[in-house]
Image: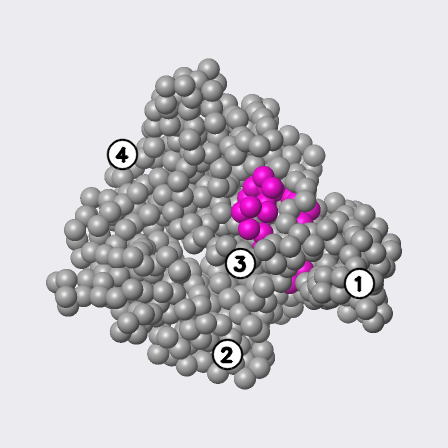
Amino acid sequence: MGRKRKGKHKKEKSSSPNSKFKTQLKDAIRKLFKNNEEDSFTYKHVSERFEIKDSNTRKLVLQCLIELSSEGFLNEVSRGNFVLNLENSNLVGVVDGTSRGGAYIVIEGREDDIYVSGKNLNRALHGDTVKVELISSRRGRQEGVVSEVIDRKTKLFVGEVKISKKFAFVITDNAKLQIDLYIPLDKLKGAQEGDKVIARISSWPKGVENPYGEVVEVLGKPGNNDVEMLGILFKNDLESKFPQEVIAAAEKVGIELDDTEIAKRRDMRDALTFTIDPFDAKDFDDALSITYLENGNYEIGIHIADVSHYVTEGSALDKEAVKRGNSTYLVDRVIPMLPEQLSNMACSLRPNEDKYTFSVVVELDDNGKLHKEWFGKTVIHSDHRLAYEDAQDTIEGKSDVLKNELLLLDKIAKKLRKKRLREGALSIESDELRFKLDNEGNPMEVVHKVSKDANKLIEEFMLLANRRVAHFVGEIKGKKEANTNFIYRVHDKPDSGKIQTFATFIDKFGYKVKFTSMDNVSEQLNQLFAETKNTPEHSLIQTMAIRSMAKATYETVNIGHYGLAFSFYTHFTSPIRRYADLVVHRILFNKLNNKEINYGKKLQEVCKHISAQERKSADAERESNKFFQVKFIKDKLGEEYTGTVSGLADFGLFVRMDENYCEGMVTMQSLPGDHYYFDADKFAIIGRRYKEEFNFGDKVKVKIIGTDLAKRQIDLELITEDNGF
């Protein structure tokens, strides 16, 4: 018994005897070169080894050698003389599985990924580290075969139990894994039919399609929020609970301040101080203070929770924090980096409480020009706790709470933002879905959150603090190279090919962008964002632009931040929820005290790990969001909505509904009036007979015909004039 998967490839046409012989010959030649890594061979040498004497077969040997050279398996060191390409014969990479059964092997430092078909994966699974060998090059795509699984990434599998009389299976949730686990009935650990469980592989005998496994934990029935969120966390290898040792360490942390410690700090408790956060926030890791100076300028304090005071390097709390890398924000819960005693109590800058902080204090004028800066440990007292909505009301003249201060900071923030955009920063605004949940955790409403002036006010001052810290620690006087004993937040320049592909997509919306060079990309994108700002497709276009860019990462080598147009940038302002910021606090404190610690390769290893953890959290948050979208839609079967085509694939088109921002799929087979296919070159779905096209950005009307919580899928039907529209 195994899973029947949809979308299997069509059977290949039967090969001729000659093509089969050629394939066998190429395989034999590969083995010859691999067994003789340092030797070179001509077609005559190979023919002699294989005792090939007839001229036609010897010509075929030469043809195979030339093809293996063009595929990268061999190097032609002189005319007709070939040697094994050692660089391409023992490549090591990570498996990125596809839902169709194949995978791409992602190799660090290599621009193109290597495709491996399902039959050539040799039991490698999504996320595994493997050795791969190149075997062919088709239509510009290099293909390979996995020769060895070096490290099995997934140790625990989340899935649903299916029980028969003599055995059971766990049908894994992750479509990229492409395996189900065979479970003996005595290894179910009490799981019942349909339960969602966590299982592990116990053995995988040769010649057996599915591995043997055992259930290690029963989560409960699918569809339940707790069960599904735990499943998402396990699937992404994220911890849901803190070890007892870490909880015990957190419980020892008190919230009372020590007079001796206060004396070592700059006391800023008399400065007017406030926080601005989401209305439902529990951890407040940043605050602003403002003091009016006699010279007409303003002293603005950007105060960040001093987590490093409580979480010392190498402690149980520190080890757990670096393991997690960051907090993960699912729709209905937060999986914090630090236990609640720290994140919501001791380190949280709650109103009317004295708190230890690490601060960037700047002197600015009305135009946002920086005159002075100071870095150091402080103690503050937050006078007001504002939600973004409260601050926005003041900015819009609907409230008088902190009117003078908020209007002044808003004015300066807008000057800072304008300067950033003028220098080449991308004008990308936060755009997210939020769900209003009832007492049982069911989504009652989808809220489309957009960034307003109050959000941008906080953003600009946090960016300023991050940037100034990066300059202070990263710049070395008299040298072009930046300090490598530091963590930078970097964002590489966009790839020209991806940017041109984006331009093709945008053309389908009816907008034109002219990327005359890589130097005008941000200018063109910002003009596009301004043009589409009040349209339904704005957030889709912005999302696509982000996807066409490189991803921001943590590195010890500074290349600047393209999206922000900063030559130096780091993360300093959120140590409660990001480990990078905690390390930056420690390095800054050491510099202020003339104490240099050389972390060596350790710091780059931390960067690599926390960048990976950030991606895992993003995947978990995305899946959590999709689950609640499906849950919100499941009682709306038969309802009709207008929407925008948000994605195209060879199995159908994705549509994002304008009213609720939820995304569903119209299958290729269900498209009415013709037989449709996906044209990858035109990036369109086209009818074979009538040539009608569906393009990215098309406005359509759809009906909800089904939902599947397990697959996180909303099924839609296209409504046309023929079927009711």
Q: Position of residue 618 (x, y in %)?
A: 49, 49
- The furthest residue to the left: 724
- Give yes or no for residue 11 being in the magenta stretch: no
Quarter of the image for residue 223 reads top left
For residue 373, which numbered disc appears in the image? none
Label 1 is placed on what type of residue? Tyr
Spatial CA distance of label 2 from label 1 is 56 Å
Return the disc, 3 or 2, that comes first in the chain's sequence: 3
Spatial CA distance of label 1 from label 4 is 73 Å
Quarter of the image for residue 699 reads bottom left
Q: Circle 2: is it few (<14), some (14-19), or many (20+) Cα within 10 Å?
A: some
Q: Residue at x 46, y 48 (%)?
A: 99
Q: Residue at x 38, y 47 (%)?
A: 6
Q: Position of residue 394 (x, y in %)?
A: 33, 61
Disc 3 target residue: 462
Return the disc, 2 or 1, that comes first in the chain's sequence: 1
Give the side of residue 112 with respect to residue 9, left or right.
right
Q: Are marks 4 and 2 in contact (CB under 8 Å)?
A: no
In the picture, which quadrant includes the N terminus?
top left
